[in-house]
Image (cartoon, helix red, strand yellow):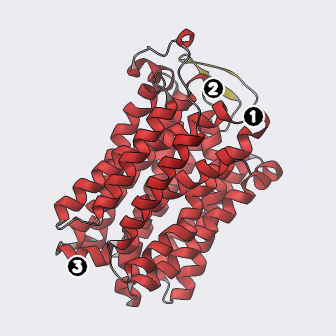
Amino acid sequence: MSKYTVLFFLIMFMIGTDTFIISPLLPTLQEQFGVSTGVAGWMLGAYTLSSAVFALIAGPLSDGWNRRTVLLCGLLGFSLSTALCGFADSFWTMCLFRFLAGISAAFTAPQVWASIPAVVAPAKITKTMGIAFSGLAASQALGVPIGSWLAASNWSVPFWTIGIASLLLVVFAYFLLPDMKPNANKGEQASILSRYVPLITSSKARSGFLAYLLLHLAVGTSFAFLGKWMADRFVLPVGQIGTVMIFLGFGNLFGSMISSYFSRKLGNAHTIATGMVLLVALYAVVPQLTSVTGVRIVYLIIFTTLGIVFPIVMGALTSLNASIRGTISSLANSTMNGANTLGAWVAGLLYVQFGGYSSIGIFSAVCMALSLGTFMLGGVFGRKEVRSGTESTSAT
């Protein structure tokens, strides 16, 4: 494993840990700041909202800058704002620091995907991207549960730990990464909006991103109040919630490792259809389970399936137009975080007003079914590639 691979894996691991750390801590933070269940979800939503909005700007804008500088500044801001979360003395200061962390993540994560082709040999690009993606899965398997265990002593400790570790990565990246300045001959001065035109004008791209939004809305809504539900339903303390969460992350990590196998054996379309039909059923069933062991097993299957599905979906989206993959990655990141923001709000509303976690399960199942239908009807897994507002044949 190369030094670049290790760096990119660790960066995505830290971003993933910080993204999901609020969920298992939600009952503790709700009590700490004295806010209602419906409002508490915005401690998650503040991060995902800012990341969603600023990713739309960060990706296309950074195409004309030195990627090394953008990554270093974004990672530095991420480390400082995350550490400050540990010093929050009210609900609103926590939301502010989470908002700033989300902005920093929006400038950092797209640079990982854009930097890999610039510093890694062509033969190793796919493998390196896969390992970097597994950093997100590993953050759920290891980072989030470890953060939950650390929070058992004090809720601030996980934020301080992520902040310090990310600061060390800034130093590592400073000495390791070369300059990655834009090529002046490739039109980097094009406006931000013009980079989105090929996607906006393509029905295939519109279908792909709508389906991607629905997919993450299903996942985000279910995950946002999972910790709260487990605390209420099974009377679990935050440390034990972290123990349950570890199965989610390991499932996601394992799924991402075997995704290419299923893609080769079944084909992308059949793999997506089979996996998402299974997810529809499982999301509807899981709220009815009466034991922690049952929940653990079902969520292990859910996140293993998601680990298989997500790399295939991302591959289909980034193949829409090879010339604007940075913009596509940023839009995908924005779509994901926008869905998670909406999911946190919807989860709070459903949990309080419409029957607790059962209504969340039904909502997630419906969103997953709509996502599958949109993917298939939109031809996202067909053989056409979006180019400058048109569609031309491409072997994908």
The mark lying in front, picked from 2 and 3, is 3
Question: Label 3: few (<14), some or many (≥20) within 10 Å?
Answer: few
Label 2 residue SS: helix
Q: Are marks 2 and 3 in contact (CB under 8 Å)?
A: no
The spot of residue 235 in percent (x, y) is 37, 90
Lower position in the chain sequence, tag 1 or tag 2: 1
Numbered circle sitting on residue 31: 3
Q: Visible in this render: residue 89?
A: yes
* Residue linked to disc 1: 121
The spot of residue 152 in percent (x, y) is 38, 83
Left or right? Give the position of 333 relative to 136.
Answer: left
The mark lying in front, picked from 3 and 1, is 1
Question: Label 2: few (<14), some or many (≥20) within 10 Å?
Answer: few
The spot of residue 177 in percent (x, y) is 58, 38
The mark lying in front, picked from 1 and 2, is 1
Lower position in the chain sequence, tag 3 or tag 1: 3
The amino acid at mark 2 is Ala
Task: Check the image and report above or below for 136 versus 213.
Answer: below
* Residue linked to disc 2: 322
Give the residue drawn at x 38%, y 87%.
237
**Quadrant of the snapshot with the C terminus:** top right
**Nearer-the-camera pick, 287 or 65:** 65
**Nearer-the-camera pick, 179 or 379:** 179
